[in-house]
Amino acid sequence: MIALAEQYAGEQKNFSVMHLVVRLISGIVVLGITAALAPDFRIANVWSLIVGAVVLAALDYLVGKLLGVHASPFGRGITGFIAAAVIIYATQFFVTGYDVNIWGALIGALIYGIVDAIIPGKAM
């Protein structure tokens, strides 16, 4: 329990604006690649892409805090994969110009996980 608290405190000390910017840029790149490769996944313009990446990160954070599930397709096995697909699908209800159907979200979650593992800077 103490080690967990020390780890959390260490993460808080290492937070910086630059870290946040790198994570945002990483999220934008990963989401753009995912939308380009996944069928039935369309992002209309760059602003929808940027806002979509921010909303995706916010939903991931909320799911992690409320349910304790890390929504990475490879982070928690099938539970993480399903959570990632639901988050990708739900983002369309918050962002104009971001359209995906359920199959696109499922394939997108798989692609997102693969691309996120390759590109440095944890996106989701």
Image (cartoon, rainbow, N blue to C red):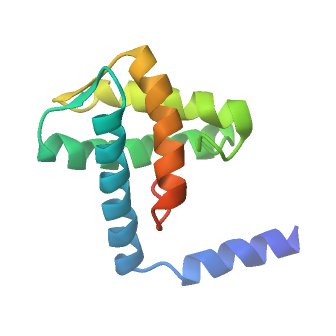
Which residue is located at x 31 percent, y 55 percent?
29
Let me know if residue 5 appears in the view: yes
Q: Residue at x 16, y 29 (%)?
A: 97
Tell me where residue 63 sits by quadrant: top right
36 lies left or right of 64: left
Image quadrant containing the N terminus:
bottom right
Q: Residue at x 18, y 40 (%)?
A: 48
Q: Is residue 61 visible?
A: no
Provide residue 56's location: percent of width, then percent of height.
39, 42
Above or below 20: residue 110: above
Residue 110 left/right relative to 16: right
Residue found at the very far front of the displayed protein: 37
Q: Position of residue 45 (x, y in %)?
A: 11, 40
| Residue 122 position (above or below residue 31) | below
Quarter location, residue 108 = top left
- The percent position of residue 116, horizontal first and vertical second, equals 49, 53
At x 59%, y 44%, the residue is 72
Could you say where residue 21 lies in the image, as x and y percent from the top left?
32, 70
Number of on-image labels: 0
Q: Is residue 54 left or right of residue 7?
A: left
Q: Residue furthest right?
A: 1
